[in-house]
Image (cartoon, grey):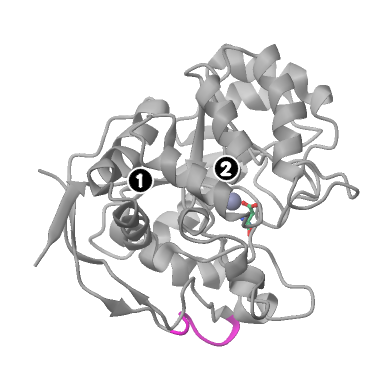
């Protein structure tokens, strides 16, 4: 049987929520990833170090016994974040980054930043303390077409941030367009990007052609095929500026399958396998390890993992759902087949 063994990977962009959903989804991630950058867009958002430490404790409690998994915490930037909180975060071991959501850009982003220029003093403080800024890169202008929101953000706010803070480490999260890829490629080594499995595997037809499929609705929204091809090329290029971040974002099936469904695809159940499919289609399985296991750790100045994970080329069917009752979640590719399967995991060499 064909197998592929790589260094244990990390997920550099993950939503695990809290409460009952956390208990349903966290084992999926902890099974395959050694570490994950945990997004702070809870209700209410995680805006202080104190809240992040409490959330971290809740996550640690949800890790299945015997599994070695480390959550890397982030803080949610708001218009009222203080310079003092940034200093405190920079000095706090479990906190690794700040997340910038333009107000209203995506799920639970109402408390985000309305005026990016107004938080420049905060960005200066992050630059000074060398703490990364993670950006949801979409404008929120209601007149801007939803398929253009990332491109316009890249040309305006992102360019402004990167030009004004050349020393700030920036991750452009979940890039979805040729323009974002080109921006990151042309920027300094302080600027990197994560790429999700759904944006590597699907274009907007998966969401909209032949019927509307809410489980393929996430933000930034799936784009046209040429953009998908640009993402595949970037992910499989071996350029260390592009690394794995699933953006696995669980919402209950009820909240997805409704007249105004939530944005977010749940992919943690099969994340590494889905990436393996995407890399195999591009005939680039040899590039998966760098993307999944090396470049993110290097960018965050963390040691690479020492364990391994072995994938085997065998087909399995993704269940129709995970969880039950109020935590029922429909995963990405529910009821469909995926061609790779995790065979074994060795936590350390
Ligand atoms: C994310 C969520 O549900 O928290 N949704 C999404 O569509 N990706 C938020 C985000 O990362 O935009
Ligand atoms: Zn996200």
Q: Which mark sits nearer the N-terminus, 1 or 2?
A: 1
On residue 239, which mark appears?
A: none
Q: Is residue 220 left or right of residue 30?
A: right
Q: Are dots 1 and 2 in contact, CB under 8 Å? A: no
Q: Read off the residue under disc 2.
A: 175
Q: Main secondary structure of the magenta part?
A: loop
* Crowd band around label 1 with a 10 angstrom C-alpha radius: few (<14), some (14–19), many (20+): many
Image point (70%, 22%), residue name: 159
Badge 1 marks a residue whose secondary structure is loop
Whether residue 56 appears in this view of the structure is yes
Whether residue 251 appears in this view of the structure is no
Position of residue 57 relative to residue 133, above or below, is below
Badge 2 marks a residue whose secondary structure is loop
Residues shaded magenta: 320-326
On the image, the x and y values in percent for residue 248 come to 51, 59
On whether residue 322 falls in the magenta region, the answer is yes
Q: Read off the residue under disc 1.
A: 10
Q: How many marks?
A: 2
On the image, the x and y values in percent for residue 199 come to 52, 54
The residues tagged by marks 1 and 2 sit, at their Cα atoms, a distance apart of 18 Å
On the image, the x and y values in percent for residue 10 come to 35, 45
Image point (64%, 80%), residue name: 210
On whether residue 228 falls in the magenta region, the answer is no
């Amino acid at each position: 049987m064909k197998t592929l063994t790589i260094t244990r990977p990390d997920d550099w962009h993950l939503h695990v929520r809290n409460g009952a959903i956390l208990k349903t989804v966290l084992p999926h991630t902890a099974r395959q990833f050694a570490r994950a950058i945990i997004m702070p867009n809870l209700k209410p958002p995680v805006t202080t170090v104190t809240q992040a430490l409490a959330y971290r404790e809740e996550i640690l409690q949800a890790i299945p016994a015997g599994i070695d998994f480390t959550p890397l915490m982030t803080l949610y930037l708001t218009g009222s974040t203080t310079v003092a909180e940034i200093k405190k975060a920079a000095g706090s071991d479990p906190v690794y980054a700040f997340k910038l959501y333009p107000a209203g850009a995506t799920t639970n982003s109402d408390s985000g930043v309305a005026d990016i220029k107004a938080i420049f003093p905060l960005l200066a403080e992050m630059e000074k303390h060398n703490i990364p800024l993670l950006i949801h890169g979409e404008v929120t202008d209601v007149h801007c077409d939803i398929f253009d929101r990332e491109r316009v953000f890249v040309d305006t706010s992102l360019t402004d941030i990167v030009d004004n803070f050349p020393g700030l480490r920036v991750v452009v999260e979940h890039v979805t367009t040729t323009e974002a890829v080109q921006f990151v490629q042309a920027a300094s080594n302080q600027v990197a990007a994560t790429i999700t499995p759904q944006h590597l595997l699907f274009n907007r037809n998966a969401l909209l052609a032949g019927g509307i499929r809410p489980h393929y609705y996430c933000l930034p929204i799936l784009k046209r095929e040429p953009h998908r091809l640009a993402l595949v090329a970037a992910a499989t290029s071996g350029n260390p500026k592009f690394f794995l971040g699933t953006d696995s974002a669980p919402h209950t099936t009820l909240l997805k399958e409704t007249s105004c469904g939530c944005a977010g695809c749940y992919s943690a159940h099969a994340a590494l396998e889905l990436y393996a499919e995407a890399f195999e289609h591009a005939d680039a399985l040899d590039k998966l390890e760098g993307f999944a296991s090396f470049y993110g750790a290097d960018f965050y100045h963390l040691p690479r993992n020492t364990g391994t994970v072995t994938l085997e080329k065998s087909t399995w069917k993704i269940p129709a759902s995970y969880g039950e009752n109020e935590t029922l979640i429909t995963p990405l590719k529910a009821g469909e087949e995926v061609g790779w399967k995790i065979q074994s995991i060795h936590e350390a060499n």
